[in-house]
Image (cartoon, grey):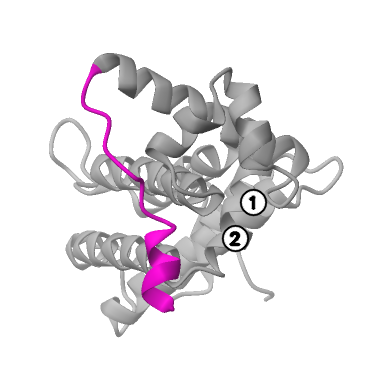
């Protein structure tokens, strides 16, 4: 039963010719648009095919179910996350030196906000539906693990990091930044600017990593992150 459900997540065949690739791209764009505007459960394969301007038969030629369309969109999102990971992996500036911890953290926060903000409504759908599918959930966890490994490698090299357990700290940093940036974009507060949230998250994470009662903002200004 579980195997049958997982098969519904896999594409029927991989497009090899350019025309086929373009057809698949159009179908995925239509699925994303309908998931975003009407929700996952209201978007049928018939509506997706109609929106894409293709026959239902053409859709089923590549995707056996609506779940497989969801899986393909999740895979696209994860690929964007891995691209982000590759960009942040070295953590160094052009000269090869590590930037101040606050600046490094702010880059991570800004990149995560940008990743989530590309299509907030679609991101919400992907996040909610992924929890119901073990394979997709495991793929999300694998990306988080990779981000944690890359973050730990950078933190071990950074002279400002003073936490007693860098491995634990890396896991906490990734989970905190992911969770907070996700909520900023998916559940925005009226009048709140993403840049203000980003600055606050930067202060929070930097203060934790420096293991002291003061923090430095991304502009280099000393800030109190706790009372006292």
Give the percent coordinates (x, y) of residue 80: 38, 40
Can residue 177 be seen here? The reply is yes
Give the percent coordinates (x, y) of residue 18: 26, 16
Which residue is outermost to the left?
96
Determine which residue is flagged by label 1. 125
Q: Tell me which corner region of the image, top left, top right, bottom left or bottom right, holds residue 138.
A: bottom left
Name the residue rendered at 46%, 75% in the picture.
Answer: 212
Which range is magenta? Answer: 1-17
Contact between marks 1 and 2 (CB within 8 A): the answer is yes
Give the percent coordinates (x, y) of residue 217: 52, 49
Give the percent coordinates (x, y) of residue 75: 38, 48
Q: In this view, does 82 lie above or below 211?
A: above
Determine which residue is flagged by label 2. 129
SS assignment at label 1: helix
Which residue is outermost to the front?
57
Q: Main secondary structure of the magenta part?
A: loop
Name the residue rendered at 34%, 45% in the picture.
Answer: 12
Describe residue 126's horizontal placement relative to residue 2 as left or right: right
């Amino acid at each position: 039963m579980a195997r049958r459900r997982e098969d519904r997540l896999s594409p029927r065949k991989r497009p090899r010719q350019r025309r086929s690739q373009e057809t698949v791209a159009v179908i995925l764009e239509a699925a994303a648009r309908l998931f975003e505007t009407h929700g996952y459960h209201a978007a049928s394969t018939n509506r997706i095919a109609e929106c894409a301007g293709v026959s239902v038969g053409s859709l089923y030629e590549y995707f056996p179910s609506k779940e497989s369309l969801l899986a393909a969109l999740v895979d696209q999102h994860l690929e964007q996350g891995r691209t982000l990971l590759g960009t942040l992996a070295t953590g160094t500036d052009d000269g090869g030196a590590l930037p101040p911890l606050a600046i490094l953290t702010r880059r991570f926060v800004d990149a995560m906000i940008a990743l989530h903000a590309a299509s907030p409504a679609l991101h919400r759908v992907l996040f909610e539906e992924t929890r119901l599918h073990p394979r997709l959930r495991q793929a999300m966890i694998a990306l988080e693990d990779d981000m944690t490994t890359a973050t730990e490698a950078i933190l071990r090299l950074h002279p400002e990091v003073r936490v007693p357990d860098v491995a634990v700290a890396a896991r906490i940093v990734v989970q905190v930044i992911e969770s907070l940036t996700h909520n900023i974009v998916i559940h925005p507060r009226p009048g709140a600017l993403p840049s203000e949230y980003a600055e606050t998250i930067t202060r929070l994470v930097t203060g934790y990593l420096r293991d002291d009662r003061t923090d430095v903002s991304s502009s280099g200004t000393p800030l109190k992150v706790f009372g006292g």
